[in-house]
Amino acid sequence: MKKYFSIYKMTLLENIQYLSNLFFNFITFTLTIYIFLCLWQYMYKDPSNLIEGYDLTQMIWYVLITECMWYGNRNKSLMESMSNDIKSGSIAYNLNKPYSYLIFMIAKHFGEITLKFIFYFIISIILGFIFVGPLDNFAFAMLPLIIISMILGVIINSLIRIVISLLSFWIEDSTPFHWIYDKLILVIGTLFPVELFPLFLQPIIKCSPIFVVNYGPAKLFIDFSFASFRTIFVAQIIYVILIVILATIIYRKGVKKLNVNGG
């Protein structure tokens, strides 16, 4: 594992050199949050009202946390680099290297998003206090458990992107599938809580990756309970195991197909 940590560390140090790029993204992020603040303020004509159990403060904090996770985990290495490696055939050169290509890409990915995720998390907290103030009865003692859930959400999101990119072994371009997945996560899990969707859709959404990627961690942040944490944590672990198995199977079949076709 030491070599993968070295890859992570080198990628992280490389991204520190371009830290100024994050400050340009800060403008886009802040404008997005401000737009949704205005939207929800209009819908909550009386801030004390509840919409599906959420008051205005909780709703804004929900959007802040989910947007933080969505912005902080966007990375072209998994969305484009893997697909391009497979399409161009350059992945064949990595198969003979003394490391796993999949773990190499994961280590590189986390090296690229670590600073970005921390940056957006800090900005989200600052904007939350500026726009709506602190959450009532926030479970500060449970913050480590909430962060664990957020990290697992990021891991699951990254693994799903790997699976989508690996489809390039069979299809010419996996970009449309990334686009569809992005929009599903953005609309269903990020901008609006699951409770705002029709009742017949809610069980389906809660059985999908959306529940464990964005909604679950954000729900714990604004309204923590041990029962919810157990449910979300167990679901996240199950998803990690299943997606790792799926990614491994797809990768091995893809490499076998590549070898049969002579690279």
Image (cartoon, grey):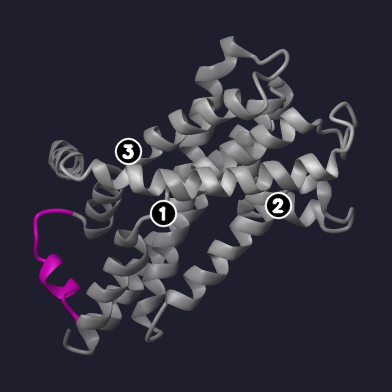
Quarter of the picture containing the N terminus is top left
Counting residues from the start of the chain, the first of labels 1 and 3 encountered is 1
Q: Residue furthest top?
A: 141
Q: Secondary structure at mark 3?
A: helix
User: How packed is label 2: few (under 14 Cα within 10 Å), some, or many (20 or more)?
Assistant: few
Is 135 placed left or right of 257 in the picture?
right
Q: Which residue is mark 2?
A: 207
Q: Position of residue 161 (x, y in %)?
A: 43, 60
The picture quadrant where one finds residue 79 is: bottom left
Q: Amino acid at mark 3?
A: Thr
Relative vertical location of residue 224 with respect to residue 169 in this rendering, above or below: above
Q: Secondary structure at mark 1?
A: loop
Q: Tell me the residue at 19%/80% (across/down).
A: 89
User: How packed is label 1: few (under 14 Cα within 10 Å), some, or many (20 or more)?
Assistant: many
Q: Secondary structure at mark 2?
A: loop
Q: Which residues are magenta?
A: 89-99
Q: Which residue is mark 3?
A: 114
Q: Do residues under tags 1 and 3 come within 8 Å of each other at their CB atoms?
A: no
- Give residue 198's mark: none
The one of 30 and 125 positioned closer to us in this rendering: 30
